Image (spheres, rainbow, N blue to C red):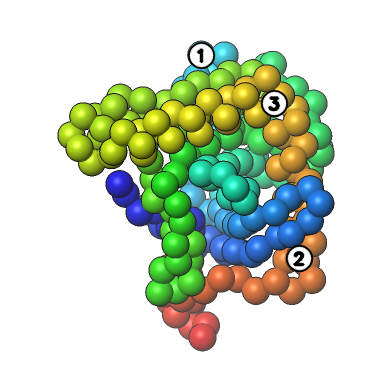
């Protein structure tokens, strides 16, 4: 199973202020990470109903949640604040007009750990769930999960647990996309308030290296 850092360094962002925090609130208990995409080209995925789905580009914000008691990472890929792609003809009214999601990508995981920089790392279990504001719900990469089980990489217990987590995600969010939107918007607001109050950027090595190129310590 692949180990992936929540600062999403494998995407090759140049500079991206990354915040990582623990939130314990009546709305949410768990790990919360926020990435600000300060620059970069727009990249898109294609979906049947929503059409082109923007996933990267300057001004976007990614919010990542790992709720306690689950084996999932919920990533909300937000448009620049207060906007959405006008090509999205069936884009709904969102829970908070400032925070307009392009897509939710939910990784099913084995667990989490910390790396030498203190960055949360999740152990990816192949299976994913993709949800769009327009109502698309798709289970993705089932073939990769099946292949990992067939090869012996995953035990029967791990395989069944991944399927069970996927089903739990579908039950929780598949029929209540507005509720998912509202939850993520509320948690993002809590995170933004912490950042506004001085929550420091988490200094992963990519951020440190970029700041050195700018003459910053």
Residue at the outermost front position:
157
Q: Nearer the viewer, residue 1 or 161?
A: 161
Asked if marks 2 and 3 touch (Cβ < 8 Å), the reply is no
Helix, strand or loop status at disc 3: helix
Q: Is residue 59 visible?
A: no
- Residue positioned 64% across, 18% down in the render: 135
- Which residue is located at x 79 percent, y 26 percent? 93
Whole-Å distance between the Cαs marked 3 and 1? 17 Å
In the image, which disc is placed on residue 48? 1
Image coordinates for residue 192, horizontal then vertical, percent? 75, 58
Residue 200 vs 165, above or below: the answer is below
Up the image or down, 40 lies above or below 51; here it is below
Distance, label 1 to label 2, CA atoms, is 37 Å
Q: Earlier in the sequence, mark 1 or mark 2?
A: 1
User: In this rendering, would 126 be left or right of 184?
Assistant: left
Foreground mark, 1 or 2, reads: 2
> Viewer-proximal residue, 115 or 181?
115
Asked whether the beta carbons under mark 1 and mark 2 sit within 8 Å of each other, the answer is no
Outermost residue on the left side: it is: 151
Q: Which residue is mark 2?
A: 194
Residue under label 3, please give it: 177
Give the number of marks: 3
The quadrant in which residue 78 appears is top right
């Amino acid at each position: 199973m692949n180990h992936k850092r929540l600062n999403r360094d494998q995407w090759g962002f140049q500079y991206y202020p990354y915040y990582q925090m623990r939130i314990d609130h009546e709305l949410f208990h768990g790990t919360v990470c926020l990435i600000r995409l300060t620059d970069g080209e727009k990249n898109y995925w294609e979906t049947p109903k929503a059409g082109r789905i923007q996933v990267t580009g300057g001004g976007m914000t990614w919010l990542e949640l790992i709720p306690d008691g689950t084996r999932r990472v919920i990533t909300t890929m937000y448009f620049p604040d207060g906007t959405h792609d006008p090509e999205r003809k069936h884009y709904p009214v969102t829970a908070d007009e400032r925070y307009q999601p392009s897509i939710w990508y939910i990784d099913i995981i084995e667990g989490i750990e910390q790396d030498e920089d203190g960055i949360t790392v999740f152990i990816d279990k192949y299976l994913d769930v993709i949800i769009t504001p327009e109502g698309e719900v798709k289970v993705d990469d089932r073939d990769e999960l099946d292949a990992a089980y067939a090869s012996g990489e995953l035990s029967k217990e791990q395989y069944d647990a991944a399927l069970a987590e996927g089903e739990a995600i579908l039950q929780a969010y598949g029929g209540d996309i507005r509720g998912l939107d509202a939850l993520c918007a509320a948690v993002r607001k809590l995170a933004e308030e912490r950042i506004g109050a001085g929550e420091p950027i988490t200094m992963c090595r990519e951020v440190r290296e970029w700041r050195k190129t700018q003459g910053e310590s």
